[in-house]
Amino acid sequence: MSDDFTARVLSVVRRIPPGRVATYADVAALAGRPRAARAVGTIMRRCARPDIPCHRVVGAGGRLGGYAGNPLLKRALLRSEGITFNGARIAIDRCRFVPGRTRRPRARSSRRA
DNA sequence: ATCCTGACGCGCC
DNA sequence: AGGCGCGCCAGGA
């Protein structure tokens, strides 16, 4: 059960392409547990696999979230992947990972970025 | 099996 | 806008 959830979470995170990010809540939802954002964090913390780009999992609202060892590294990693930073926040609306979407959303009438 | 902790999220103050 | 508290879930002791 939970073990299955964990595997699904890892699978989802693995599918996040470079230059794109997903919130803990998003990953949880994609894994089938919309309310398990915190659990995703727990899993990420324990995650140490090289094939899992855990740095692409961020907090809600573009918050950086955490990163064992080096939050700075996480920020640098994301930035080098093309993620636009708004101060300490991420322009998540521009790079939010959505299954099926390969292109990043256009600016449209975006309010203050 | 139980209790405590923690890379979260959101409503309130 | 920032800080606090409560709710949710899974992992570890």
Image: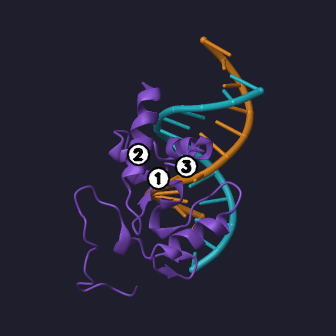
Chain colours: A purple, B orange, C cyan
Front-lying residue, A93 or C5: A93
Looking at the image, residue A6 lies above or below residue A49: above
| Callout 2–callout 1 Cβ contact below 8 Å | yes
* In the image: residue A86, left or right of residue A71: left
Disc number for residue A28: 2
Q: Can residue A58 be seen in this view?
A: no
Task: Please name which of the two marks, 2 or 3, marks the residue nearer to the observer.
Answer: 3
- The residue tagged with tag 3: helix, strand or loop? loop
Callout 3 amino acid = Pro
Disc 3 crowd rating (10 Å Cα; few below 14, some 14-19, many 20+) is few
Q: Name the residue under label 1.
A: A24
**Which residue type does callout 1 highlight?**
Tyr
Disc 1 and disc 3 in contact, CB within 8 angstroms? no
Q: Which residue is drawn at 42% across and 50% down?
A: A13
Q: Nearer the viewer, residue A35 or A29?
A: A29
Q: From mark 2 to mark 1, how far is it between C-alphas?
A: 6 Å
Is A53 above or below relative to B2?
below
Instruction: Where is residue A92? Give x, y as percent.
Output: 41, 71
The residue tagged 3 is A50
Foreground tag (1 vs 3): 3
Which residue is depicted at the point 52% across and 54% down?
A: A54
Q: Residue C9: horizontal and vertical position, in percent? A: 47, 34
- Helix, strand or loop at label 2? It is helix
Q: Mark 2 lies on which chain?
A: A
The percent coordinates of residue A63 (x first, y second) are 53, 67
